[in-house]
């Protein structure tokens, strides 16, 4: 990912307005193939709506369920735990090393992947078996509703997917309208604490931050997830810290750690935690996370 992929406010407005036109899906008639453009700009063709799909990333599982097609999943990777129904799906390995034999045994008619480097060996097997591979990698908040719509086309659940996408776009438009004129807040995005890691502006987390009027203090870093020093964080003068947390009780522990390190924002209590899975997965729950982030930044203001 590169910084130029980040949406400006105008770009977000345009994507939300165009919405369905950007879904890149072509639902077909009874005698025509289904063609959908994936996030690697590949045209993925299905002879009929998918009925036995396997997902190789938790966010892809969430997108499928949001599109009303969770009942058509026959396998997924470890960590695909949302919605709760996904926990009952057969596990075919993890996202970096999916088990080709387990996938083949599931007899899928569609494979939904994320990282090409992890999926490539399995994709070659699927190619031999004649199973289409769709790559899902939403890079911005505004791309998530369109991703749900494309899942609806792939599975033939367009009415449910379109309704879900409309709701997501409405929520994003409401956030944009509400926070467009708010005072910018300087934020340190904590991706790790020991050692300290952060994220730059090419991350989808920063995209959510921008929507709320936040400014990532390490947004211009050269790589997506750089390691930084405590001195560097202090010098950046963040007004708030945002971290993904596994449990609610992790946030007060995080606050105490930053207070002990002498961060002025922490002394004022401005250390916030958002559910890590919702924050880092480019799926529907990132919109929930964005709403929480916006509310947190208003506390700073």
Image (cartoon, helix red, strand yellow):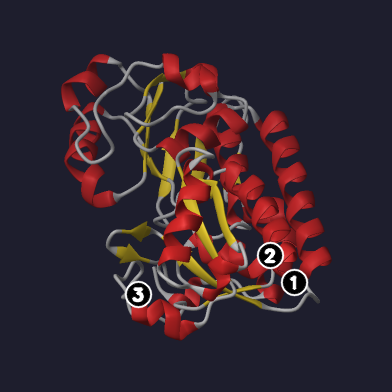
Residue 258 image point, x, y percent: 45, 64
Counting residues from the N terminus, which is met first, the one under dot 2 or under dot 3?
3
For mark 1, what is the residue?
A: 301
**Residue at the spot 54% in from the left edge and 66% down from the top edge:** 266
For mark 2, what is the residue?
A: 297
Instruction: For residue 37, say whether it is visible.
Output: no
Using the rendered view, name the quadrant where residue 211 is placed. bottom right
C-alpha separation, residue under disc 1 versus residue under disc 2: 6 Å
Using the rendered view, name the quadrant where residue 91 is placed. top left
* Residue 17 shown left or right of residue 289 in the figure: right
Of the pair 67 and 183, the residue shown nearer to us: 183
**Residue at the spot 25% in from the left edge and 42% down from the top edge:** 119
C-alpha separation, residue under disc 1 versus residue under disc 3: 24 Å
For mark 3, what is the residue?
A: 230
Of the pair 223 and 46, the residue shown nearer to us: 223
The answer to whether 31 is drawn above or below residue 211 in the figure is above
Q: Looking at the rendering, in which quadrant would you find the N terminus?
A: bottom left
> Mark 1 and 2 residues: CB-CB less than 8 Å, in contact?
yes
* Residue 96 shown left or right of residue 141 in the figure: left
Which is closer to the viewer, label 2 or label 3?
3
Using the rendered view, name the quadrant where residue 264 is placed. bottom right
SS at mark 2?
helix
The answer to whether 223 is drawn above or below residue 248 in the figure is below
SS at mark 3?
helix
Counting residues from the N terminus, which is met first, the one under dot 1 or under dot 3?
3
Residue 170 image point, x, y percent: 79, 50
SS at mark 1?
loop
**Residue at the spot 54% in from the left edge and 26% down from the top edge:** 83
């Amino acid at each position: 990912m590169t910084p130029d992929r980040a949406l400006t406010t105008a770009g977000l407005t345009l994507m939300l307005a165009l919405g369905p036109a950007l879904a890149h899906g072509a639902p077909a008639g009874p005698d025509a193939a289904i063609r959908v453009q994936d996030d690697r700009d590949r045209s993925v063709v299905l002879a009929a709506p998918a009925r036995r799909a396997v997902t190789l990333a938790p966010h892809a599982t969430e997108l499928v369920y949001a599109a009303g097609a969770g009942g058509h999943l026959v396998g997924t990777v470890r960590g695909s735990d949302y919605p709760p129904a996904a926990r009952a799906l057969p596990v075919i390995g993890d996202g970096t090393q999916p088990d080709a034999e387990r996938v083949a045994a599931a007899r899928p008619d569609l494979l939904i992947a994320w990282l090409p480097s992890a999926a490539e060996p399995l994709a070659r097997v699927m190619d031999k078996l004649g199973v289409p591979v769709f790559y899902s990698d939403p890079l911005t908040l505004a791309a998530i509703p369109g991703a749900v719509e494309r899942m609806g086309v792939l599975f033939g659940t367009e009415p449910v997917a379109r309704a879900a996408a409309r709701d997501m776009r409405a929520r994003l438009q409401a956030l944009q309208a509400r926070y467009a004129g708010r005072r910018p807040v300087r934020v340190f995005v904590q991706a790790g604490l020991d050692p300290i890691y952060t994220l730059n502006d090419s991350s989808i987390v920063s995209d959510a931050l921008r929507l709320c009027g936040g400014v990532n203090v390490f947004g211009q870093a050269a790589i997506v997830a750089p390691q930084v020093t405590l001195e560097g964080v202090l010098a950046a003068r963040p007004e708030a810290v945002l971290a993904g947390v596994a449990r609610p009780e992790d946030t007060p522990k995080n606050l105490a750690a930053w207070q002990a390190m002498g961060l002025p924002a922490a002394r004022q209590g401005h250390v916030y935690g958002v559910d890590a899975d919702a924050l880092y997965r480019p799926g529907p729950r990132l919109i929930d996370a964005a709403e929480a982030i916006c509310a947190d930044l208003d506390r700073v203001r």
